[in-house]
Amino acid sequence: MNQAAFDPVSFLEAAVQTSSHESVDEMREFVVETLDRFGVECEVAAGGCVLAEKRSDAPDDGPHLVLNTHLDTVTPHVPFERGEAREDERGGSASTDPTSDDGSEDVIRGRGACDAKGPLAALLAGFLAAQPERGRLTLALTPDEESLSLGAAALTGQSPGTEDRLDGDLFLVGEPTGLDACTAAKGRFQGTVELSGTAAHAAEFAGANAVAAAEGALAAIRTFDDDADEHPQLGPPKLTPTVIEGGGATNQVPADCEITVDRRSVPPETAEGFRSSLTDAVRESTPGDVGIEVALTDRESPFFEAFSTDPDHGLVEAVTSAARSAGESVGLRADRGGAVRPFGAATEASYFAPAPTVVFGPGDLADDAGAVAHAEREYVRVREVEAAAETVERAVSGLLGDA
């Protein structure tokens, strides 16, 4: 990399070849070294997060904008490769404008290429280029978004003994969105419905059958959202029973049964509100002699709850207008990027709400040929990385420039 100018594509090529699936230590060191090379001091904060800041001369006269993404990646291993796009990497609205050049398209393949090292390259480019004239800008990189998000929980004061280190007014979260501005995402909770009866010999009319009570519990789960309102951006919530276990002997009235459920929530539902409401619903549908307990799965950090940002907010407009301009400047199709839509997966953006939050970045979770992120065909288009970097730079300048 040329010290005089940060090149997001060169950074991405090196980043994809830097291990970050079992430990982010090497990747974090690479990012810290990159920031240092460009004269930016940074801090490795609680939870292993990387923090860097740029303050204007008038930090209180503008918003505090936070650029966030994660350093970790997941299996499977995808070796680094750069070359012309294959047929399955060209299709649909993701392809470039055939009038812009000879129709070829350069891609970078490898673990983390789009989730989320491509977005990281774009955020770094925007951060390093920024010269805030008002407000301040923070780069916040977290180490374990793909697992428990302990870093983000610590940064936002949602872990025991921590305080909010960010206190941001606006958040731009790097994930593969195809250069769209994603303003909402469903939450994801996991819990169990535990049914407790009384064991007895199956030949006797005795005991309280916990497995039989599951019939009522499953009915309550199936009808739980019958009267739910659809969210204007996310649609309806969804509750799915995923695992059921119960009984221990074929000739015994079973005393215990457990149903695991997956919840995809929409605002304003919270994890605790869901647990309480499901408890009431199951209780109404099961015999009184069977005990009911609905519990959320234990974890060291909060679940990702649903979030939504007003699509008309200035942050959204700054990102979408910048994305459209950047896409045009690098030769992307007019219908690639710049739209406003929900994001298809749960993210750490949840931790930053209710502050206005937009999820944005190059690449796709999936394309016309199937899964891309977390898959053996993970890739990102080079021109999208360039467009994403330009988008972040333009958006930051617009939000933190002269009012």
Image: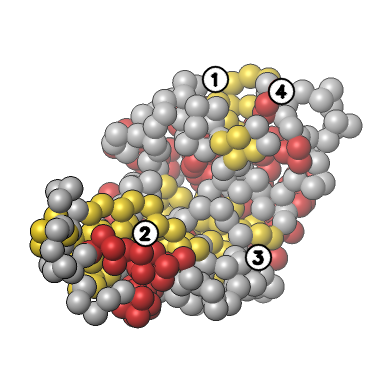
Residue at 68 percent across and 43 percent down: it is 387
Instruction: Decide which of tag 4 and tag 2 comes sooner along the chain.
Output: 4
Q: Residue at x 28, y 63 (%)?
A: 212
Q: Which residue is mark 1?
A: 81
Q: Position of residue 349 (x, y in %)?
A: 47, 61
Q: Are marks 3 and 1 in contact (CB under 8 Å)?
A: no
Q: Amino acid at mark 3?
A: Val
Question: Do labels 4 and 2 touch, CB within 8 Å?
Answer: no
Q: Residues within 10 Å of mark 3 (few under 14, many from 20)?
A: many
Tell me: residue 169, above or below residue 380: below
Q: CA distance from mark 4 to mark 2?
A: 39 Å
Mark 3 vs mark 2: give the one in front. 2
Q: Position of residue 270 (x, y in %)?
A: 40, 74
Question: How much space separates mark 4 and mark 3, taking CA atoms?
Answer: 33 Å
Which structural element holds mark 3? helix
Instruction: Indicate the amino acid at tag 4.
Output: Glu
N-terminal label among 3 and 2: 2
- Foreground tag (2 vs 1): 2
Sequence-earlier tag: 3 or 1: 1
Q: Mark 1 or mark 4, which is nearer to you?
A: 4
Q: Which residue is mark 2?
A: 261
Q: Nearer the viewer, residue 175 or 274?
A: 274
Q: Residue at x 38, y 52 (%)?
A: 242
Circle 2 Cα neighbour tier, 10 Å, few/some/many (<14 / 14–19 / ≥20): many
Percent across and percent down for residue 65 are 51, 65
